[in-house]
Image (cartoon, grey):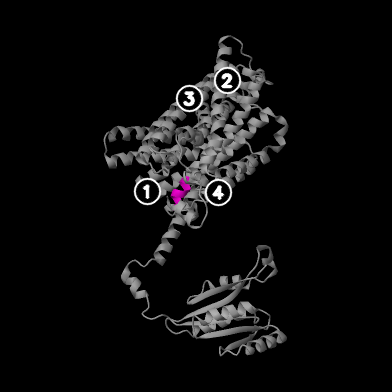
Amino acid sequence: MNANALKYRLIGKPLRSSELQAQRYGVLWGLPVLSSDAMSSVAYATEEILLVLVPVLGMAAYTPMLGVAGVIIGLLFMLILCYRQVIDAYPQGGGAYSVARENLGRIPSLIAASGLIIGYMLTIAVSSCSGAAAIVSAIPQVEPLRVPLIVLFILLLTVGNLRGLRESSKAFGLPTYFFVASMLAMIAIGAVKAALGQVEPAEQAAQLSQTTGDLTLFLFLHAFSSGCSALTGVEAISNSVPNFSDPSRRNAKVTLVALGLIVLCIFGGSCALAMLYHAAPADNLTVIAQIAAGVFGSDSIGFYLIQTTTALILLLAANTAYNGLPQLMSLLAQDSFLPKRFADKGSRLVYSHGIVFASTFAIVLVVAFNGDTHLLIPLYAAGVFLSFTLAQGGMVIHWRRKRCRSWMRKALINGAGAAVTALVFAIIVSSNFLAGAWISLLAIGCAAWAMNAIFHHYQNVKKALGLNDNERAKRLLLAEAPKARIIIPAYAINKPFIKTLNYARGLSDNIEVYHVKVSAQATRRFKADYQKLEISIPLVIEKAPYRNVNEVLLDHIDEKLGELEKHETLTIVIPQLVTKIWQMPLHNQTTLMLESALVGRRNVAMVTIPYLIDS
């Protein structure tokens, strides 16, 4: 039983076998959970390519589109080959971050991690927006509700992932396979109809001229950079190797190859059908919807099946980020680059803080860009390809340092990957800089700076609190227990005060009860009640001329601090009334205010004595 399971057993919470086995799955469920992002790219990557080419080339855009798609698929298989080696070298997960951390240093690793974090959050936003676009293509009446619908989808995904990855992988796996099956069926039927001469071009084709411009290198590269959003899901598998069942490395590598083959079929096939059926970007009707309408008919079951499975796979593609991002943030937290809470798992043995973080920022992106996929795409791929480049460059150094069997061949593969992904990164930034790539670069820089600042904070805290060696600990440990002076602030003689007084008497004989006078009548009552206790502990009463009770009390504490002898401490023991949450505003939270005021004073300790009111 692992440490998390033991923790929940100790607090008496029953554990189910499914909870103990969370985050462990084979290729069957790992493929849809970690690869749905790349699989679903067909729903928007083809359209993003045509969105660049069609306005310039018109009907002549389809042949260059196939060329762009071919280059993207070739790049995908190069990345798969490179990341198979990353999985072998870093089975603990982390992908680009782990590689860069070990081989390139802290700052490059933080840049890689920042690019991945931004990419994962954009995966959630882009996939959800594209899913909503598929729904709008089938049901145009829901267009006014697009943004609320996207936010609802993200919240549902959040709840599903917070319940545990094993449960969510099964829930999300079947729709992924339905999508793949329906797309392959559409491609096969569409190809057969095209061979039989039964193709009916999409209605949008009538609006396209034969040619309106020339194909230039910049236009081709711009279309390529837009289509590269199809490659953003490759990193997730290498980030989540520990989530696979044993043998985890083998299962992760098989999943990676299966991903490439599926994308080859559905992305390449959909681009071919887009050319055959002359599908073109249009408002409220996606390219995939136009292809489905041409193959099956706009009012057929096949059309609505394609739209339904497309919407589902796009929404579930966000699940890739919910698996990869929390795992990455956990590694960053363990290395002191993020708050430590991101390394902790919740009751379902998932990184709940990372999941909530991802959902929050994805919703912010959706609202800020009004749920428009085309506005989000330019932000998408820059950070991911920057991470790809750092990962492959780091792997070259890794193989050179390890010099294991066939290290030169492995270094050559990763070196070629680094060169190609660096070129792609430059193309993406140059062609989409003003369209939004600058936002991603700025966000990556700010995130890397923030994580570096968090790291320095933790290092400073460790240095300030550390003892360094046992001899220093012995020097700091006093030979005799230090003497304590105690002040008990009190406003009335009641049960909480008596409980506090009894506790203080067990700590020291040097006790003082302190009362601030704001009402002469209340003070006379307090003094009379105190005398009835018949105790020898001195009572100090001071007047608050402006009813500034806390200021007078703090001045008195500062005065006592000046009277302390060496190794003496001043302890403030104060009762705290414990009520129900909704009752808290009905009481003055004096204890909390006093605690915040004393936290910056040396040689002062504060002890609160809770007193629970019976219901």
Indicate which disc, 3 or 1, sits on the residue closer to the N terminus.
1
* Mark 2 or mark 1, whichever is nearer to me: 2
Indicate which disc, 2 or 4, sits on the residue closer to the N terminus.
2
SS category of the residue bearing label 2 = helix
Q: Which residue is mark 2?
A: 186
Q: Which residue is mark 4?
A: 357
> Disc 1 versus disc 4: distance between alpha carbons?
26 Å
Q: Are marks 2 and 1 in contact (CB under 8 Å)?
A: no
- Of 400 and 534, which appears nearest the observer? 534
Q: Position of residue 237 (x, y in %)?
A: 45, 37
SS category of the residue bearing label 3 = helix
Indicate which disc, 4 or 3, sits on the residue closer to the N terminus.
3
> Disc 2 versus disc 1: distance between alpha carbons?
48 Å
> Disc 3 versus disc 2: distance between alpha carbons?
15 Å
Label 2 crowd bin: few (<14), some (14–19), many (20+), radius 10 Å: many
| Residue type at tag 2 | Met
Q: Is residue 365 above or below residue 496?
A: above
Q: What span is in magenta?
A: 327-333
> Disc 3 versus disc 1: distance between alpha carbons?
35 Å
Q: Which residue is mark 1?
A: 105
Position of residue 428 in the picture relative to residue 89 (left or right): right
Q: Position of residue 156 (x, y in %)?
A: 61, 42
